[in-house]
Image: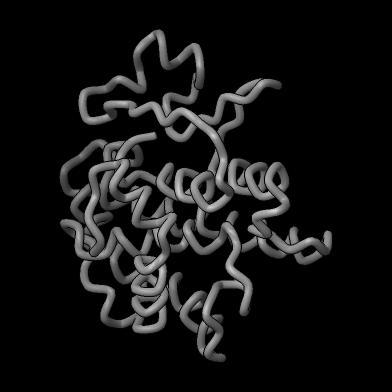
Amino acid sequence: YAPNACSLAPHIALNDAGAEYEAVKVDTAHGEQRSAAYLAINPKARVPSLVTDRGTLTEVPVLLGYIARTFPKAELAPMDGFDFFQMQSFNTYLASTIHITFAHIFRPERYADSDAAKADMRSKAPNSLIEQFQLVEERLSDGREWVHGDKYTVSDPYLYVFARWFGRDGVGSIAPLPRIAAHRARMQKRDAVLRTLEQEGLAPV
């Protein structure tokens, strides 16, 4: 994991599940994810990576699904097969759309070389984020407590990760998304979330 990266979501899920695990910090600020030792674990040079007795898994939606299925007593995912894949659909939207838009703010060099192009991306991305998050905001408009209704699932810590990123340089305020802000506040009352934040050296937002 790297503190406050998307790896925070499966880290929270492991604590939700009561799993026994070793948390290994990767110093992405100094490029440790590109070291030979880490590339041997995950050649994508990204966090998170989950090393299991059957091999290494990567990509947050996969890790969240794996944790939920490996620890069924924690009830972190729907038991019904179709509902499970609806959950995975939501998680994949966060990964493939929301996270990528944040990357246009935090890592514009992945997508452009010129300073002008990078500035254009940084300028446009916050409005795009609000548009993309509206789907989630509308989902919460029926008064549900958690992403998929009354039952907490691994989608909730994943949404929490991105709700935390509002307020970072260039992102803007979460104020246009009051239901997501309220969800973020509920998450920060959960023991597993507070424990994980402490482990990663983070504070509630």
Q: Is residue 154 left or right of residue 2?
A: right
Which residue is found at the position 41% from the left and 10% from the top?
Answer: 37
Q: How many marks overall?
A: 0
Q: x, y percentage for residue 104?
A: 32, 50
- Viewer-closest of 18 and 176: 18
- Viewer-closest of 203 and 64: 203
Q: x, y percentage for residue 50?
A: 55, 30
Which residue is found at the position 46% from the left and 28% from the top?
Answer: 22
Q: Is residue 118 left or right of residue 59?
A: left
Q: Is residue 153 left or right of residue 99?
A: right
- Viewer-closest of 45 and 20: 20
For the C terminus, the image quarter is: bottom left
- Viewer-closest of 115 and 81: 81
Q: Answer with the quarter of the image where residue 131 lies.
A: bottom left
Which residue is found at the position 22% from the left and 73% from the top?
Answer: 173
Q: x, y percentage for residue 76?
A: 64, 58
